[in-house]
Amino acid sequence: DPVLAGFTVLYSCEWIGAHDGLLKDGEADFVLAHPAIGFLVIEVKGGRVSRRIADGKWTSTDRDEETHPISNPVAQAKKSKKVILDALRKTWPGHAPFIWARHGIVLPHSYRAPSAAAFGAAMAPELVACKEEMPKLGAYLFQMLAWAQEGTSERPGGLGQVGISL
C-alpha cells in the first residue's frame, strides 16, 4: 500500500517485558513504525467480534455460527504498546525523546457498531478498523497512528532511524 511507504511493518511481534510489575511474555499482531511519526500496535480479531456491555466479555462468531470467547483486543494492544514503549525508552542510547505511540484493533469481518460504547470507554472508535475500512486499510491505519483526541496538545514524536533499529 503506497500510503504505508516509509513504514517498517512487523508481524507477530513477540516480546518479553515487565507489565503490572511482573515479567510477562506476549505478542502484538502487527507493529507499524515510522521514523518521523512513531508506532502503532495493531491487534487483529477475525470472525464477527462483539463485546457484551454488561460484563465486558469479548466473543467472536465464526463462519459456522459458533461463538467463542476471545481475549480483550483493546487490552492486548494497549499492553503490547506499553511494553514496546518501555523497552524503547530503556534501550535508547542517551535520553529517549517523546515517542508517539498508539494502539488499535482491526476487525475485518465485523461491521462497525452503531454505538461508540461498543468497545468500552478505553477505546476510541477512531482506533478501530472494521469491515467498512478494509478497502482503504492503509490510509485508515495511517489515520489511527496520527489520531489525537480533540483539544489535546500532543504532537507526534518520531522514532528516527535509531528507534526503528531498536
Image: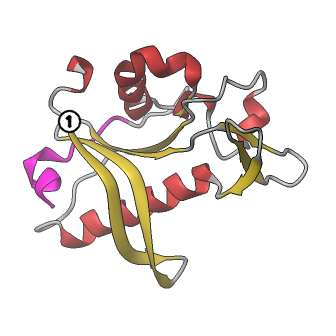
Span highlighted in magenta in the image:
155-166
Residue 76 lies in quadrant: bottom right
Q: Which residue lies furthest to the right in this view?
A: 54
Give coordinates of residue 12: x percent, y percent.
Answer: 35, 55
Residue designated by label 1? 7
Residue 97 lies in quadrant: bottom left
Image-based side of 45 in relation to 34, left or right: right
Image quadrant in which the N terminus is located: top left
Q: Residue at x 36, y 19 (%)?
A: 139
Q: Residues within 10 Å of mark 1 (few under 14, many from 20)?
A: some
Q: Residue at x 50, y 41 (%)?
A: 104
Image-based side of 126 in relation to 86, left or right: right
Residue 146 lies in quadrant: top left
Give coordinates of residue 18: x percent, y percent.
Answer: 43, 78
User: Callout 1: helix, strand or loop?
Assistant: loop
The amino acid beneath tag 1 is Phe
Q: Which residue lies furthest to the front in this view?
A: 64
Image quadrant in which the C terminus is located: bottom left
In the rendered image, the vertical position of residue 161 relative to residue 34, given as above or below = below
In the rendered image, the vertical position of residue 143 relative to residue 117, given as above or below = above
Image-based side of 9 in relation to 152, left or right: left
Give coordinates of residue 89: x percent, y percent.
Answer: 27, 66
